[in-house]
Amino acid sequence: MRAEPLGAAPTPLSVLDLVTVGAGRTATDALRTSVELAKLAESRGFHRHWVAEHHSMPGVASSSPAVILAHLAAHTTRIRLGSGGVMLPNHAPLVVAEQFGTLEALAPGRVDLGLGRAPGTDGATAAALRRTDNLREGADDFPKELAELTRFLDDDFPDGHPYARIHAVPGPVQATSPGGVQSQHRPPVWLLGSSGFSARLAGMLGLPFAFAHHFSAQNTIPALDLYRESFRPSAVLDAPYALIGVSALATDDEKEARRQVLAAALNMVRLRTGRPGLVPTPEEAEAYEFNEMERDFITSWNSNVVHGTPDEVRTGLDDLAKRTGADELMLTANAHSGEVRLRSYELVADAYGLPHLS
């Protein structure tokens, strides 16, 4: 669960991967970048590589985190892999337990199961995923679904429960079968959030917590305070452990960083106004005529993106770690091209003097 910072980093550093697809690129290109990113992150001492779940967004090819994680597991040997996160109301708990039991069998001892209660998309797509228009019910049922998923992972439904004879395989039931030998590991559960609900629930259950600072920065410190205040020691953790997702992009010069984050921000403008598409090029963003409302959004959005030269990004991350007291920083580099994203993580690693691991 925990890790020590490497080099001069203020906390362990990790990767949040949205598998972004730029204009003129394909999903195949984006997935190849994810493999290269996982290999780079592993070789430079990043602690985790998580994949987000999003749907119906042309510029985000991470609709199936478990499938992507299985592919990444085949190309790595040490780095922790996980979901950031699986949106639990979109899925049956048994299916999630089976998927992550399979991932654990593929990569023993290095799989994280991060769970969220939001849909990871718009309402119409969420309704199609869940085959119901009552989306509020899915969010309200999240604690119940979480408890059910945990029992499937641990194979410990009580006698008399309707699911007592149902087992998530791969899973602990294999150890109780004649001649069975089962892995000692099971994926640790994390709760993800962008407000106070999951922060409080994670604290009450003694689970690790991941907060989406990259798109809900105004709520970061209140949510982390609530998590720490609500925390109760558990078999999983004896003290709170919180990471935050951070938009961070390092480039070789400051001007290029501004060009890249403008393009990523234009992508967000389009998403927030119901026009999702591929991540535009910096040239397209520079030529785009922003209206006043869009310019205000861009200014607000980019104020929470740590970007610039490697030294500027290091200073920004150091300050963020100090202000929030986060135990881990999980960086997401949003840019049009995979090459820029890969270069950003390499520059951050160099800025902190992270090791080159074999």
Image (cartoon, rainbow, N blue to C red):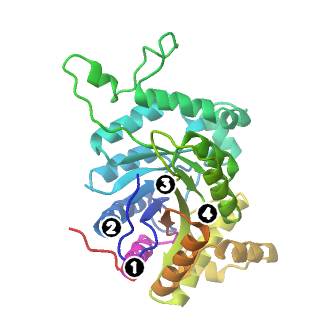
**SS state under label 4:** loop
Spatial CA distance of label 3 from label 2 is 25 Å
Q: Nearer the viewer, residue 290 or 187?
A: 187
Q: Nearer the viewer, mark 3 or mark 2?
A: 2
Q: Amino acid at mark 4?
A: His
**How far is the residue under mark 3 from the one under mark 4?**
21 Å
Q: CA distance from mark 2 to mark 1?
A: 11 Å
Q: Nearer the viewer, mark 4 or mark 1?
A: 1
Name the front one of labels 3 and 1. Answer: 1
Question: Which residue in the structure is indicated by mark 4?
Answer: 213
Specify the quadrant of the image occupied by residue 316. Answer: bottom right
Magenta region: which residues? 334-350
Q: Which residue is mark 1?
A: 352
Would you call the spot at circle 2 few (<14 residues within 10 Å), some (14-19), or many (20 or more)?
A: many
* Tags 3 and 1 touching, CB below 8 Å: no
Task: Indicate the position of residue 33 as horizontal and vertical percent values.
Answer: 38, 64
- Residue 208 lies, in percent from the top left, at 51, 49
Residue shown at 46%/60% (left/top)? 17
Of residue 145 and residue 343, the one placed in the foreground of this image is: 145
Specify whether 121 is left or right of 165. Answer: right
Q: Is residue 144 one of those drawn in magenta? A: no
Separation (CA) of disc 4 from disc 1: 21 Å
Label 4 – label 2 distance at C-alpha: 22 Å
Residue drawn 73% across the image and 36% down it? 136
The residue under label 3 is which amino acid type?
Answer: Ala
Up-down: is 258 above or below 273?
below
Residue corresponding to mark 3: 61
- Which comes sooner in the sequence, label 4 or label 1? 4
Q: Main secondary structure of the magenta part?
A: helix
| x and y percentages locating residue 339 in the rendered image | 40, 74
Residue that numbered label 2 is attached to? 45
- The image quarter containing residue 116 is top right
